Amino acid sequence: MAKLSNLVNTSLNKEVIKIQGVAIPVIFTMRSFPFVEQAYGKQYLFFEKELNNMMSNKNQTMGHKETKLMYALVYAMVRTGGTECTLSEIEGSISFSDLPDIFEKVMGIFNNQTFQKTDMERIKTAKKS
Protein backbone atom coordinates (compact mmCIF):
# COMPACT_ATOMS: atom_id res chain seq x y z
CA MET A 1 0.00 0.00 0.00
CA ALA A 2 1.29 3.45 -0.92
CA LYS A 3 2.06 6.06 1.71
CA LEU A 4 0.30 9.37 1.34
CA SER A 5 3.64 11.14 1.73
CA ASN A 6 4.89 9.29 -1.37
CA LEU A 7 1.93 10.55 -3.40
CA VAL A 8 1.44 14.15 -2.28
CA ASN A 9 3.18 16.89 -0.35
CA THR A 10 2.01 16.30 3.22
CA SER A 11 3.84 19.41 4.44
CA LEU A 12 1.90 21.77 2.19
CA ASN A 13 0.38 23.72 5.08
CA LYS A 14 3.36 23.49 7.43
CA GLU A 15 5.50 26.54 8.05
CA VAL A 16 7.97 27.58 10.71
CA ILE A 17 8.43 30.64 12.85
CA LYS A 18 11.63 31.56 14.61
CA ILE A 19 11.52 32.01 18.35
CA GLN A 20 14.90 33.00 19.79
CA GLY A 21 16.47 31.79 16.53
CA VAL A 22 14.93 28.30 16.75
CA ALA A 23 12.60 27.10 13.98
CA ILE A 24 9.24 26.09 15.48
CA PRO A 25 6.71 24.30 13.22
CA VAL A 26 3.33 26.02 12.93
CA ILE A 27 0.10 25.20 11.13
CA PHE A 28 -3.46 26.45 11.22
CA THR A 29 -6.19 23.86 10.76
CA MET A 30 -9.58 23.04 12.20
CA ARG A 31 -7.70 21.55 15.17
CA SER A 32 -6.41 25.06 15.97
CA PHE A 33 -9.79 26.45 17.04
CA PRO A 34 -9.87 24.93 20.54
CA PHE A 35 -6.32 26.22 21.15
CA VAL A 36 -7.39 29.73 20.08
CA GLU A 37 -10.38 29.56 22.41
CA GLN A 38 -8.26 28.29 25.28
CA ALA A 39 -5.68 31.04 24.86
CA TYR A 40 -8.11 33.87 24.16
CA GLY A 41 -10.73 32.86 26.70
CA LYS A 42 -13.63 33.35 24.30
CA GLN A 43 -15.28 31.42 21.50
CA TYR A 44 -13.46 31.44 18.17
CA LEU A 45 -16.07 33.64 16.48
CA PHE A 46 -15.40 36.42 19.04
CA PHE A 47 -11.66 36.01 18.56
CA GLU A 48 -11.98 36.28 14.78
CA LYS A 49 -14.24 39.34 14.99
CA GLU A 50 -11.84 41.12 17.35
CA LEU A 51 -8.85 40.11 15.21
CA ASN A 52 -10.55 41.54 12.11
CA ASN A 53 -11.34 44.75 14.01
CA MET A 54 -7.71 45.03 15.07
CA MET A 55 -6.43 44.44 11.54
CA SER A 56 -8.81 47.01 10.03
CA ASN A 57 -7.79 49.70 12.53
CA LYS A 58 -5.49 52.15 10.76
CA ASN A 59 -4.17 53.48 14.06
CA GLN A 60 -3.05 50.11 15.32
CA THR A 61 -1.49 50.02 18.76
CA MET A 62 0.13 47.24 20.75
CA GLY A 63 -2.02 47.34 23.86
CA HIS A 64 -3.15 44.50 26.09
CA LYS A 65 -6.03 43.43 23.82
CA GLU A 66 -3.85 43.43 20.70
CA THR A 67 -1.03 41.45 22.25
CA LYS A 68 -3.55 38.97 23.68
CA LEU A 69 -4.92 38.40 20.16
CA MET A 70 -1.41 37.99 18.77
CA TYR A 71 -0.19 35.58 21.42
CA ALA A 72 -3.41 33.53 21.17
CA LEU A 73 -2.94 33.00 17.44
CA VAL A 74 0.76 32.18 17.80
CA TYR A 75 0.01 29.75 20.63
CA ALA A 76 -2.70 27.98 18.65
CA MET A 77 -0.47 27.56 15.62
CA VAL A 78 2.51 26.34 17.64
CA ARG A 79 0.32 23.77 19.45
CA THR A 80 -1.31 22.60 16.20
CA GLY A 81 2.17 22.39 14.67
CA GLY A 82 3.03 19.75 17.26
CA THR A 83 4.96 21.63 19.93
CA GLU A 84 3.75 21.13 23.49
CA CYS A 85 3.71 24.41 25.41
CA THR A 86 1.60 26.69 27.55
CA LEU A 87 0.39 30.17 26.71
CA SER A 88 2.64 31.49 29.47
CA GLU A 89 5.64 29.83 27.84
CA ILE A 90 4.80 31.42 24.50
CA GLU A 91 4.41 34.83 26.12
CA GLY A 92 7.66 34.37 28.04
CA SER A 93 9.68 33.15 25.06
CA ILE A 94 8.72 35.84 22.53
CA SER A 95 10.01 39.31 23.31
CA PHE A 96 7.68 42.24 22.78
CA SER A 97 10.00 43.51 20.03
CA ASP A 98 9.89 40.16 18.17
CA LEU A 99 6.12 39.74 18.43
CA PRO A 100 5.14 41.91 15.41
CA ASP A 101 7.37 39.97 12.99
CA ILE A 102 6.21 36.59 14.31
CA PHE A 103 2.61 37.75 14.21
CA GLU A 104 3.01 38.92 10.62
CA LYS A 105 4.19 35.44 9.66
CA VAL A 106 1.34 33.62 11.43
CA MET A 107 -1.22 36.09 10.01
CA GLY A 108 0.00 35.19 6.53
CA ILE A 109 -0.59 31.53 7.27
CA PHE A 110 -3.95 32.28 8.91
CA ASN A 111 -5.12 34.34 5.91
CA ASN A 112 -4.24 31.52 3.50
CA GLN A 113 -6.71 29.17 5.19
CA THR A 114 -10.23 29.22 3.86
CA PHE A 115 -12.85 28.12 6.35
CA GLN A 116 -16.53 28.70 5.80
CA LYS A 117 -18.78 30.04 8.55
CA THR A 118 -20.59 26.67 8.55
CA ASP A 119 -17.29 24.91 9.27
CA MET A 120 -16.76 27.02 12.39
CA GLU A 121 -20.34 26.47 13.55
CA ARG A 122 -19.74 22.72 13.49
CA ILE A 123 -16.84 23.00 15.87
CA LYS A 124 -17.80 21.90 19.32
CA THR A 125 -16.08 23.66 22.15
CA ALA A 126 -14.79 21.23 24.73
CA LYS A 127 -16.55 21.57 28.06
CA LYS A 128 -14.40 23.29 30.61
CA SER A 129 -14.10 21.48 33.90
Image: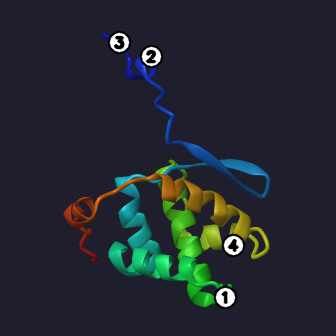
On the image, the x and y values in percent for residue 34 come to: 36, 65
- What type is the residue that disc 3 sits on? Ala
Circle 1 SS class: loop
Say few, some or many: other residues with alpha carbon within 10 Å of mark 2 (under 14 / 14 to 19 / 20 or more).
few
* Residue that numbered label 4 is attached to: 92
Instruction: Answer with the quarter of the image where residue 87 lies.
Output: bottom right
Give the mark, 3 or 1, whose residue is nearer the N terminus: 3
Mark 1 touching mark 4, by CB under 8 A? no
Residue 6 - label: 2
Q: Is residue 11 above or below residue 44?
A: above
Say few, some or many: other residues with alpha carbon within 10 Å of mark 1 (under 14 / 14 to 19 / 20 or more).
few
- What type is the residue that disc 4 sits on? Gly
The CA distance from mark 2 to mark 3 is 7 Å
- What type is the residue that disc 1 sits on? Asn
Is there any visible trace of residue 45 in the rendered image? yes
Give the mark, 1 or 2, whose residue is nearer the N terminus: 2
Looking at the figure, which quarter contains the C terminus? bottom left
On the image, the x and y values in percent for residue 30 come to: 35, 54
* Residue that numbered label 3 is attached to: 2
Q: Is residue 83 left or right of residue 63?
A: left
The CA distance from mark 1 to mark 2 is 48 Å
The CA distance from mark 4 to mark 3 is 43 Å
As drawn, the residue found furthest toward the top would be 1
